[in-house]
Image: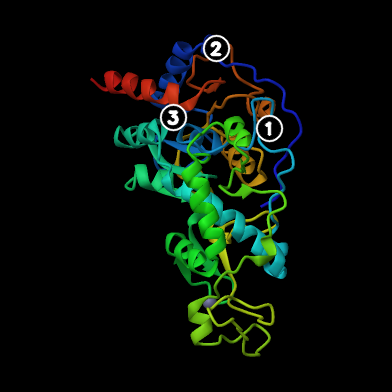
Amino acid sequence: MRIPYTGPLPPPTIIPRSANTPTGAVAALTEFLSAPPSRHLKHPHAQNEQTVLLTGAGISVASGLADYRGTNGTYTLNKTYRPIYFNEFCANHEARKRYWARSFLGWTNLHKSKPNISHYSIKELGSLGRISSVITQNVDSFHLEAHPNLPTLELHGYLRSLVCLTCRKEYSRKDFQNQLSALNPAWASFLAEVLESGAMDTEDPEERRKRGFKSNPDGDVDLPEAPYHTFRYPACPVCLNNPPQLADGNTGKIDVDHEGAWLDSSDAGILKPAVIMFGESIPAAVKDAAEYAIDQASRILVAGSSLATYSAWRLVKKAQDNGMPIAVLNLGGVRGEEKFFADIKPGNMGQEAVRCSQNAEKILPTVVEALEDYRR
Ligand SMILES: [Zn+2]
């Protein structure tokens, strides 16, 4: 995954022009989702007349998770925020301590948060036969929770699990939290105090900042001056019990302290969140599955994403190359959108393209209602 495009994005041109109000946006999206397959489709074997949905951070905002971007396309939440890079995580024990300390503090809030009405509207759109599958950039698992029966591909992985960098076994992040608590009692009591203070209860980043906390889109918490170097994290239990063979043929060495915390003299058994970090490649199987999901559908709807990450942008580009109609429901600008909407005919009321700048959680439930009426 590359670092997202962070330059300012121009405000969108609304398509059709009537989609500049919530009512108009609902009408256009209803038209989009119920239109017959476009005659411009180049893909000869699109298997269904349905829509593939691509979602981003914007649809989790109503669950209390922060979006990476404000409506002007810049990082608004925390100017000093710098995500950890994959290579840094793999190579640097100190960087991992810092990562896990922040993740430890942020997890409770993330773990408490729930899918919102957008996710449940997507479930309904699936039941109505309008959506064939979901591709999400989000790592919060809300889609799976809200609509376990509608196929969902998590393009950038998921925070609910850890993966061992050596043996690739996955573990529950929830259980890991308890292990981190046991290894870091001082941090655990600090976290208890923070939770007690109510600073994590507010969804308002400004209010949280006033109470002394900053939180970031991936659910971690930034504490200037915190003694991150004291933080301890466990080794992969499988590798610890059965030292693995490394790529160079040597046997991996996993050293732990008397309580099981990974020591820097080790060369294997490092646990990583099962998300795609910046600088880390999306597995080929995931990329292929995403492209397959695009090819199987007749149109694409982007909801709550500015397509700032290349992996998401290129899927929409692929849909365009397939001749698929594109709809974008996102507050604020979208990377390269003028090219996606370059050749739209004036008579289009939503069949061939929609661009609206509205909150997904306000629009999608009404689209569901309109499509239910449409079916009657
Ligand atoms: Zn392992």
Mark 2 beta carbon near ligand 1 (under 8 Å): no
The spot of residue 338 in percent (x, y) is 68, 25
Q: Residue 307's image quarter? A: top right
Crowding at mark 2 (Cα within 10 Å: few <14, some 14-19, many 20+):
some
Marks 3 and 2: which is nearer the front? 2
- Indicate the secondary structure of the residue bearing disc 1: loop
Return the mark for residue 37.
Answer: 3
The spot of residue 53 in percent (x, y) is 47, 37
What's the distance in space between the residues labelled 3 and 1, CA to CA? 39 Å
Is 215 situated left or right of 142 in this image?
right
The spot of residue 314 in percent (x, y) is 63, 43
Q: Residue 126's image quarter? A: top left
The spot of residue 350 in percent (x, y) is 49, 18
Q: Amino acid at mark 3?
A: Pro
**If you read the primary sequence from the N terminus, does the residue marked by circle 3 or circle 2 appear first?**
2
Is 25 situated left or right of 15 in this image?
left
**If you read the primary sequence from the N terminus, does the residue marked by circle 3 or circle 1 appear first?**
3
Q: Amino acid at mark 2?
A: Asn
Q: Residue 275's image quarter? A: bottom right
Along the line of sight, the residue nearer the viewer: 323 or 32 = 32
Work out whether residue 155 can be spotted. Answer: no
Residue drawn 56% across the image and 37% down it: 66
What's the distance in space between the residues labelled 3 and 2, CA to CA? 25 Å
Read off the residue under disc 2. 20
Read off the residue under disc 1. 76
Mark 1 beta carbon near ligand 1 (under 8 Å): no
Along the line of sight, the residue nearer the viewer: 203 or 36 = 203
Residue drawn 57% across the image and 75% down it: 261
What's the distance in space between the residues labelled 1 and 2, CA to CA? 25 Å
- Indicate the secondary structure of the residue bearing disc 2: helix
